[in-house]
Amino acid sequence: MLWIITQNENSLMSVKEVTVKGNYIEGVVGRSFFSEWSKALGKYESSERATEILNEIYMKIEEGKGSSITFTMPEK
């Protein structure tokens, strides 16, 4: 399970998938047969920076020891 604190620190959410969309990072929080619910986790100065953060999330998952991983979205 991946728990992420959003960039504005107003939400802690369990996400099923993390995606870069332009300079935003979105997390999928729910799915049904025909639809998907996602929420912006953070907005950054460029898509390159958003991709760097996605890689940081990946590294955190790789290092994880246990069933639950936490990550705080960077401010910048």
Image (spheres, rainbow, N blue to C red):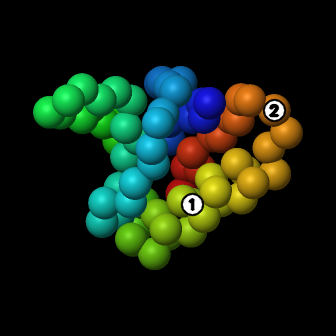
User: Which residue is painted at 35% across and 63% down in the image?
Assistant: 23
Residue 23 in the figure: left or right of residue 18: left
Using the rendered view, name the quadrant where residue 37 is placed.
Answer: top left
Q: Mark 1: which secondary structure?
A: helix
Q: Which of the marked residues, 1 or 2, is nearer the chain's N terminus?
A: 1
Which quadrant holds the C terminus?
bottom right
For residue 20, above or below residue 65:
below
Identified at 52% across, 27% down, the residue is: 14
Closer to us: 7 or 69: 69
Please, is residue 7 above or below residue 74 in the view? above
Whole-percent x and y of residue 29?
Answer: 38, 30
Q: Amino acid at mark 1?
A: Ile
Q: Which residue corresponds to the image point at 65% horizontal and 40% vertical from the top-left?
A: 71
Q: Residue 56 appears in which quarter of the rendering?
A: bottom right
Q: Estimate the x, y position of residue 74 in percent, counting from the top left.
A: 59, 50
Q: Nearer the viewer, residue 47 or 57?
A: 57
Count of numbered labels shown in the rendering: 2
Q: Nearer the viewer, mark 1 or mark 2?
A: 2
CA gap between label 1 and label 2 equals 22 Å
Residue type at mark 2 is Gly
Residue 72 percent location from the top left of the image: 63, 40
Res 3 visible? yes
Residue 8 visible to an observer of this rendering: no
SS class of the residue under badge 2?
loop
**Does residue 69 appear left or right of residue 28 in this picture?**
right
Residue at label 1? 53
Image quarter where the N terminus lies is top right
Can you tell which quarter of the image residue 28 is in? top left
Q: Which residue is mark 2?
A: 66
